[in-house]
Amino acid sequence: MQLGEWMMLNITPRMQLLCGMSICIYATYMAQFCLNFDSFLWMYSVVFGIGFGICYFLPILCAWSYFTNRPMTAGSILCWFSIMAIYNSSVCAELLNPHNERPTVIVHNGKNIEKFYDVDSDQVKKIPEMLSWLSFFGFCCMALAVPLINKKEDDTGPKKTNPNIVKLHDYLHEDFVDKTDDSTTPVRTE
């Protein structure tokens, strides 16, 4: 998210959204071609996470630029940003297992019982189709969001910035040094 915060202060929201969502869509689409778990984990978790981290602060930035005196509104807009995860989880369950079939492989792992689908099951064979659908859905969201995203320009002059963004910037770049102690050893304060 530090990369997203840096981009938030140095490039336009449209360009930041385009970069972040392009990385997310690429990672989702390419995850279907991974042949082992390590490459899938790298693509779907790390690469997708970088793209998502770039986009994460954008709803807050745009909300703060329009609603400077209403911080709850910015939080509400961020909650709507998370609705995509809720929607995708229900759609993925419907795509992978439309008939609600139970897993067939049962593994006793100590005290736990883990249930999996067989490698040759329909659910496992539908994973590439699901990842293709998720990347297509992400592309449609990006195509809709990039032209519509906008940050309100400050009316008070070029030097004055939004106070909420300044607070966020100061918080992210806090030096965590105890100012009451004369020693130079940094101490993290909570």
Image (cartoon, rainbow, N blue to C red):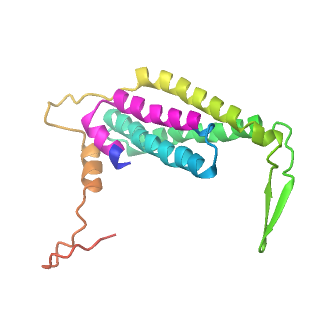
Tell me: residue 73, above or below residue 151.
below
* Position of residue 131 measured from the top left corner of the image (x, y, whole percent): 64, 35
Q: Is residue 87 magenta?
A: no
Q: Depth check: 125 or 65 in front?
A: 125
The residue positioned 46% from the left and 35% from the top of the image is 23
Q: Is residue 41 above or below residue 108?
A: above
**Residue at position x 67%, y 41% in the image:** 89
Q: Residue at x 30, y 49 (%)?
A: 168
Give the side of residue 115 with respect to residue 61, left or right: right
Picture mark count: 0
Viewer-closest of 20 and 153: 20
Q: Position of residue 153 (x, y in %)?
A: 25, 28
- Residue 69's spot in the image, x, y percent? 32, 41
Image height check: is 113 above or below 137? below
| Closer to us: 85 or 164 | 85
**What residue span does the magenta drawing correspond to?**
4-30
Q: Position of residue 158 (x, y in %)?
A: 14, 31
User: Which quarter of the rendering shows the C terminus?
Assistant: bottom left
